[in-house]
Image (spheres, rainbow, N blue to C red):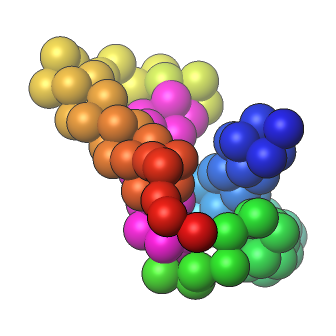
C-alpha cells in the first residue's frame, strides 16, 4: 500500500507542479492575464505541500525521484494540453527517468 500511495502522491504532485507552470506560461506567453498566473502560483504551492506527504522522510530522495516523474509528466502534459508529439528519444528519455524513479524510491534498502 505504501508504494501505491507514493505513486499517487507523485502523480498528484506532477499535476500540481506541471499544471501550475503551464498556467503561468499561459498567463505570460499567451497573454491570458493575472488570474491564470495566480492560479499557477497556487498550484505550485500545492505541489510543495503534496511533496511533504510522501512516506519517505528524505527530502533529497523525494525531490530527486520526483524529477523523473516531472520529465515524463511534462511530456504527457504537452501532448494533452498543447498537441506536442514526442519523438522516440523523448519517450526513451522519459522511460530512463521513470526507471530512475523506481530505483531511487522503491529499491530494497536495509532498515
- Residue shown at the point (20%, 19%) measured from the top left: 87
Looking at the rendering, the stretch of residues picked out in magenta corresponds to 61-77
Rendered location of residue 24, percent (x, y): 63, 67
Rendered location of residue 60, percent (x, y): 48, 81
The answer to whether residue 108 is left or right of residue 96 is right
Count of numbered marks: 0
Q: Quadrant of the N terminus?
A: top right
- Residue shown at the point (42%, 56%) measured from the top left: 104
Q: Is residue 71 magenta?
A: yes
Judge whether 77 appears above or below 5 on screen: above
Q: Quadrant of the C terminus?
A: bottom right
Judge whether 96 appears above or below 18 on screen: above
Judge whether 69 appears above or below 58 on screen: above
- Residue shown at the point (59%, 24%) measured from the top left: 80
- Residue shown at the point (34%, 19%) measured from the top left: 85
Please identify the quarter of the rendering in which residue 50 is found.
bottom right
- Residue 97 visible in image: yes
- Residue 44 visible in image: no
Of residue 40 and residue 75, the one placed in the foreground of this image is 75
Rendered location of residue 110, percent (x, y): 49, 64
Rendered location of residue 4, percent (x, y): 77, 36
Residue that sits furthest to the front in the current view: 110
Question: Magenta region, mostly helix, strand or loop?
Answer: helix
Q: Is residue 7 magenta?
A: no
The answer to whether residue 106 is left or right of residue 54 is left
Of residue 75 and residue 31, the one placed in the foreground of this image is 75
Amino acid at each position: 500500500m505504501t508504494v501505491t500511495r507514493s505513486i499517487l502522491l507523485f502523480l498528484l504532485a506532477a499535476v500540481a507542479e506541471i499544471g501550475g507552470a503551464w498556467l503561468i506560461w499561459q498567463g505570460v506567453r499567451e497573454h491570458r492575464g493575472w488570474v491564470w498566473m495566480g492560479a499557477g502560483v497556487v498550484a505550485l504551492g500545492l505541489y510543495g505541500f503534496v511533496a511533504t506527504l510522501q512516506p519517505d522522510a528524505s527530502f533529497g530522495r523525494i525531490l530527486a525521484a520526483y524529477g523523473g516523474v516531472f520529465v515524463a509528466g511534462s511530456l504527457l502534459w504537452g501532448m494533452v494540453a498543447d498537441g506536442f508529439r514526442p519523438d522516440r528519444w523523448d519517450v526513451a528519455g522519459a522511460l530512463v527517468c521513470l526507471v530512475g524513479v523506481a530505483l531511487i524510491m522503491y529499491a530494497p534498502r536495509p532498515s
